[in-house]
Image: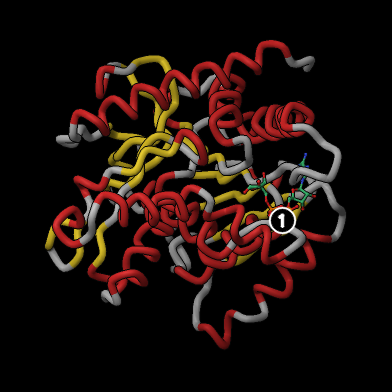
């Protein structure tokens, strides 16, 4: 939509970043989508290529590739994908240190040029990177969030649909907590064509789908051999940016700052949140089962412990 006056920045022109840019541009909801990367020529070349698909696809949004942040000035929303994937021989802590340096630097640069931006973090390790971006940005907590729940929920929905031979668009699935070990599936909130999942599958059958969802990213990495998933991840990140840009006030599972909701405070955790122009407008409290509620508390403790690892990092 030429003339919407809206601008989005995506930091990192790798697989995840470029796929996110392409989805956002194709929706025609912004005047510009700016893509930055440290690699010279990469964002510019991708931008040129994407822009040349506009006449065929029929949208007007311009993609701008840049290596510095001047081009990002005045962004309404930004998605941070910059970071390194884990390399052989690299420990989790090594990755944490490297990506923390990158996320710190890009967040500072982003906010300097876009003081009113809403930031969506996808760089791993997600829980720590979201907290770090929030701390470094100086923005209100509700303007910084992380992407985990939409992706895990849609992976869960996919596995449920495949298992039951159901229409994917009739499956409602929800995961809370965060990625990996701290993922908290919420079967009580899942349904297929309106029927509760818990009446369609046994706890063991649901457990098997949950396990595959938990390992969903690793399964794809194992098949690809190099790199990680980016089609479904970019759908999730782009949907969040869109909700902010269009002030949709839609509820989606995101990594949001908790201030007492679900009895949890002072931690970024995957919960259903209403996203709009102000970022996280509200954390929605669903009627979880006692077990789900207990699992969410365990996840909050695990995330808080992981976040404390940030304190030991050199800047
Ligand atoms: N500023 C901007 N871009 C950077 C910086 C930086 N300081 N440092 C690295 N990058 C860029 C790289 O040049 C690369 O183009 O980030 C990009 C990362 O792209 P990929 O290696 O293709 O990784 P991708 O699959 O896109 O994943 C990005 O998302 O899901 C997570 O674990 C994943 O943390 C990783 C992130």
Residue 9 place in picture, x, y as percent: 59, 49
Residue visible at 82% across and 46% down in the picture: 38
Q: Indicate if the residue with disc 1 has its beta carbon within 8 Å of ligand 1.
A: yes
Please state, as top left, top right, bottom left or bottom right, where the N terminus lies in the image: bottom left
| Scheme by which the image is coloured | secondary structure
Residue 203 visible from this viewpoint: yes
Q: How many marks?
A: 1
With 192 as the anchor, is 27 left or right in this view?
A: right
Residue 269 place in picture, x, y as percent: 41, 29
Up-down: is 302 above or below 27? above
With 219 as the anchor, is 118 left or right in this view?
A: left
Residue visible at 52% across and 40% down in the picture: 180
**Residue under label 1:** 13
Up-down: is 294 above or below 75? above
Residue visible at 57% across and 21% down in the picture: 306
Residue 50 place in picture, x, y as percent: 66, 73
Asked whether 174 or 273 is in front, the reply is 174
Asked whether 121 or 28 is in front, the reply is 121
Please state, as top left, top right, bottom left or bottom right, where the C terminus lies in the image: top right
Asked whether 91 or 137 is in front, the reply is 91
Q: Quadrant of residue 124?
A: top right
Residue visible at 32% across and 18% down in the picture: 264
With 64 as the anchor, is 234 left or right in this view?
A: left
Residue 74 place in picture, x, y as percent: 56, 42
Residue 118 visible from this viewpoint: no
Q: Quadrant of residue 114?
A: top right
Up-down: is 267 above or below 121? above
């Amino acid at each position: 939509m030429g003339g919407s006056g809206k601008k989005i920045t995506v930091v990192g022109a790798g697989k995840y970043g470029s796929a996110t840019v392409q989805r956002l541009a194709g929706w025609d909801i912004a005047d510009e989508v700016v893509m930055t990367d440290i690699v010279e020529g990469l964002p510019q070349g991708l931008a040129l290529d994407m822009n040349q698909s506009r006449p065929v696809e029929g949208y007007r949004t311009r993609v701008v590739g840049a290596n510095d942040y001047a081009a990002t000035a005045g962004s309404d929303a930004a998605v941070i994908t910059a970071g390194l994937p884990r390399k052989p021989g690299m420990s989790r802590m090594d990755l944490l240190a490297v990506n923390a340096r990158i996320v710190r630097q890009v967040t500072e640069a982003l906010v300097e040029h876009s003081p009113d931006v809403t930031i969506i973090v996808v760089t791993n390790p997600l829980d720590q990177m979201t907290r770090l971006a929030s701390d470094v940005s100086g923005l209100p907590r509700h303007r910084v969030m992380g992407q985990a729940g939409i992706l895990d929920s849609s992976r869960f929905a996919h596995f449920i649909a495949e298992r039951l031979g159901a229409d994917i668009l009739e499956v409602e699935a929800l995961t809370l907590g965060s990625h990996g070990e701290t993922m908290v599936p919420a079967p009580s909130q899942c349904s297929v064509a309106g029927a509760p999942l818990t009446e369609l599958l046994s706890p063991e059958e649901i457990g098997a789908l949950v396990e595959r969802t938990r390992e969903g990213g690793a399964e794809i990495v194992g098949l690809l051999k190099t790199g990680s998933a980016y089609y479904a991840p970019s759908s999730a990140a782009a949907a969040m940016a869109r909700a902010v840009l269009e002030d949709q006030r839609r509820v989606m599972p995101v990594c949001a700052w908790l201030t007492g909701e679900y009895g949890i405070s002072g931690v970024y955790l995957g919960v259903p949140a209403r996203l709009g122009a102000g970022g996280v407008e509200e954390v929605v409290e669903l009627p979880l089962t006692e077990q789900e509620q207990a699992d969410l508390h365990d996840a909050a403790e695990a995330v808080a412990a992981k976040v404390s690892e940030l304190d030991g990092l050199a800047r």
